[in-house]
Image (cartoon, coloured by chain):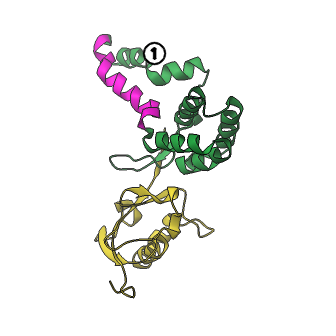
C-alpha cells in the first residue's frame, strides 16, 4: 500500500501539478479554501491557485495588464484564505478593466469551474487510475 | 398584491448551525436577507455566534444564497426578497 501511495503522490502529471511546478508555486496556502461540509462541498472562498489561473486567462485574452494581475494577486495573497472570495476578486478587478472587458471577466467568473484546477486534478487522477499502474 | 403583507420565504439551515434544531427547513417572513437572518437567530439563538462575527457583520465562514445566487455578488444582507424565495444558509469549513 505504501508503495502505491508513494507512486501516486510522485507521478506529478496532473493539471494542478504542472501549473504549480511551472510557476514554482508550492505553498499550502495556495490551495486552502472554505467550503461547505456537506455535498456538493460548495466553495465559499476560492483557492489562490484558481484565481491565478483565472487572472492568467484575463492576461492572455488581453483584458488585464500583467502588473494589474500582480497587484490583484498581491492583495489577495495578503489576506486570510477565507477572504479570497470571487466577490472580492470582482471588486479588486473593477478599476483595471474597461466596461467591455469587465462584462467578459464577469462571464468567466460566472462559470468558474474551468479555472478550478484542483477539480481537474481529481478528475485526471481518477481517470488515470494511477493506483492500478502502481499495484 | 397587498404590500403590507409580510413576504413568506423558505430558509434551509445546515445541521451544524444548531444540532438541536428539529426543523432545518422552515418558512418565515422578511423583506431582506438581513431580516430573515434575524428571524433565524431569534428562532435558534445559539446560532448567533456562528452566523455573526464580533462586529455584528456576517461571519466569513457563512455564505447565504437566495434561489442559488450568492448574495455577496449583489446587495449582501440588504438583498431584497420576493414571495417564495428560498434562502440557503451555508456554514463553511476549511479545506485544502
Relative to A48, is A120 on the left or the right?
left
Judge whether residue A46 can be spotted in this image: no
The image position of residue B1, as x and y in percent, is 32, 83
- Residue at the image position 38 percent from the left and 60 percent from the top: B16
Tell me: residue A133, above or below residue A109.
above
Give the magenta range: A113-133
The image position of residue A114, as x and y in percent, is 43, 33
Residue A118 lies in the magenta stretch? yes
Residue at the disc numbered 1: A10
Viewer-nearest residue: A91 or A117: A91
Chain letter of the residue beneath label 1 in the structure image = A
Name the element at disc 1.
Answer: helix
- Residue at the image position 57 percent from the left and 42 percent from the top: A100
- Residue at the image position 47 percent from the left and 60 percent from the top: B71
- Residue A30: name its quadrant: top right
Tell me: residue B44, above or below residue A30.
below
The local crowd at label 1, few if under 14, some if 14 to 19, many if 20 or more residues have their Cα within 10 Å, is few
Q: Which chain is green?
A: A
- Residue at the image position 45 percent from the left and 15 percent from the top: A10
Task: Give the colour of chain B.
Answer: yellow
Viewer-nearest residue: A7 or B10: B10
Residue B88 lies in the magenta stretch? no
Q: Main secondary structure of the magenta part?
A: helix
The image position of residue B48, as x and y in percent, is 49, 71
Tell me: residue A110, above or below residue B81.
above
Tell me: residue B70, above or below residue B50.
above
- Residue B58: name its quadrant: bottom right
Amino acid at each position: 500500500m505504501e508503495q502505491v501511495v508513494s507512486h501516486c503522490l510522485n507521478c506529478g502529471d496532473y493539471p494542478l501539478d504542472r501549473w504549480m511546478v511551472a510557476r514554482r508555486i508550492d505553498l499550502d496556502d495556495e490551495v486552502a479554501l472554505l467550503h461547505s461540509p456537506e455535498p456538493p462541498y460548495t466553495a465559499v472562498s476560492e483557492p489562490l491557485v484558481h484565481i491565478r489561473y483565472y487572472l492568467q486567462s484575463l492576461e492572455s485574452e488581453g483584458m488585464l495588464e500583467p502588473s494589474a494581475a500582480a497587484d490583484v494577486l498581491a492583495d489577495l495573497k495578503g489576506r486570510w484564505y477565507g477572504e479570497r472570495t470571487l466577490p472580492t476578486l470582482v471588486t479588486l478587478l473593477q478599476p483595471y478593466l474597461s466596461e467591455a472587458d469587465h462584462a467578459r471577466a464577469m462571464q468567466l467568473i460566472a462559470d468558474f469551474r474551468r479555472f478550478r484546477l484542483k477539480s481537474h486534478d481529481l478528475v485526471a487522477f481518477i481517470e488515470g487510475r494511477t493506483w492500478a499502474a502502481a499495484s | 398584491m397587498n404590500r403590507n403583507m409580510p413576504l413568506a420565504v423558505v430558509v434551509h439551515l445546515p445541521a451544524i448551525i444548531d444540532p438541536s434544531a428539529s426543523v432545518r427547513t422552515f418558512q418565515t417572513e422578511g423583506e431582506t436577507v438581513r431580516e430573515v437572518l434575524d428571524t433565524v437567530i431569534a428562532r435558534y439563538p445559539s446560532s448567533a455566534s456562528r452566523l455573526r462575527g464580533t462586529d455584528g457583520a456576517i461571519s466569513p465562514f457563512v455564505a447565504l444564497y437566495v434561489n442559488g445566487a450568492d448574495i455577496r455578488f449583489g446587495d449582501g444582507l440588504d438583498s431584497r426578497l420576493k414571495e417564495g424565495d428560498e434562502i440557503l444558509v451555508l456554514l463553511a469549513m476549511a479545506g485544502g
